[in-house]
Image (cartoon, grey):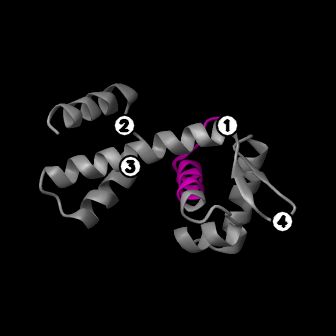
């Protein structure tokens, strides 16, 4: 199953919240993203059916191996792009917002070149 940008955003958010809180519920994801309960419920159903998350009886959301792979890749892109933009002199808010848009469409080849460039000039 190929995820759309919104699916990647949900997985990245679950990943970040799980690092911060340990236990993530749909209400936490909705609050973080500013989405309604029905929207989050539908997204969790799609992600669960796609094999990206599991939802326990206690309501806890966990990333599967496939979900974790997508979430970590998306989060890495977000953090590297944000850092690169800020080093170029872009203010933090704009850098983070732009990185959030670009992280979903940038090719692996271009991203790896940017990541190498950032590392080489650290």
Closer to us: mark 4 or mark 3? 4
Label 2 crowd bin: few (<14), some (14–19), many (20+), radius 10 Å: few
Specify the farthest residue to the right: 57
What residue span does the magenta drawing correspond to?
1-16
Could you tell me if the residues under marks 3 and 2 are in contact, i.e. CB atoms within 8 Å?
no
Circles 2, 1 touching at the beta carbon (< 8 Å): no
| Mark positioned earlier in the residue sequence (2 or 1) | 1
- Going from the N terminus, do you reach mark 4 or mark 3 first? 4
Residue 115: x, y in percent?
Answer: 28, 34
Q: How far apart are marks 3 and 2 (CA)?
A: 11 Å
Tell me which label, 3 or 2, sits earlier in the chain: 3
Q: Relative to residue 51, is residue 6 drawn left or right? A: left
Q: Give the numbered dot on residue 83.
A: none
Which residue is disc 2 drawn over?
Answer: 106
Q: Is mark 1 on a helix, strand or loop?
A: helix
The residue wearing badge 3 is 78
Asked whether the viewer can see residue 103, the reply is no
- Whether residue 14 appears in magenta in the rendering, the answer is yes
- Asked if the residues shown at circle 3 and circle 1 are in contact, with their CB atoms under 8 angstroms apart, the answer is no
Residue drawn at 22 percent across, 46 percent down: 84
The 10 Å Cα crowd at callout 1, few under 14, some 14 to 19, many 20 or more, is few
Q: Mark 3 and mark 4 in contact (Cβ < 8 Å)?
A: no
User: Separation of disc 2 and disc 1 at Cα?
Assistant: 23 Å
Q: Name which quarter of the figure residue 58 lies in.
A: bottom right
Q: Mark 1 points at which residue?
A: 65
Q: Which of marks 3 and 2 is in front?
A: 3
Mark on residue 58? 4
> In 3D space, how far apart are the residues under numbered discs 4 and 3 (Cα atoms)?
30 Å
Residue 37's place in the image compared with 85, above or below, is below
């Amino acid at each position: 199953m190929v995820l759309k940008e919104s699916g990647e955003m949900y997985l990245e958010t679950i990943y970040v919240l799980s690092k911060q809180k340990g236990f993530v519920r749909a209400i936490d994801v909705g609050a973080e993203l500013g989405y309604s309960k029905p929207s989050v419920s539908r997204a969790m159903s799609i992600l669960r059916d796609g094999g990206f998350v599991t939802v326990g009886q206690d309501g806890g959301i966990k990333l599967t191996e496939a979900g974790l792979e997508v979430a970590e890749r998306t989060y890495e892109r977000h953090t590297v792009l944000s850092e690169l933009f800020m080093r170029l002199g872009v203010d933090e808010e704009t850098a983070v917002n732009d990185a959030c848009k670009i992280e979903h469409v940038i090719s692996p080849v271009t991203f790896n070149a940017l990541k190498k460039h950032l590392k080489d000039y650290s």
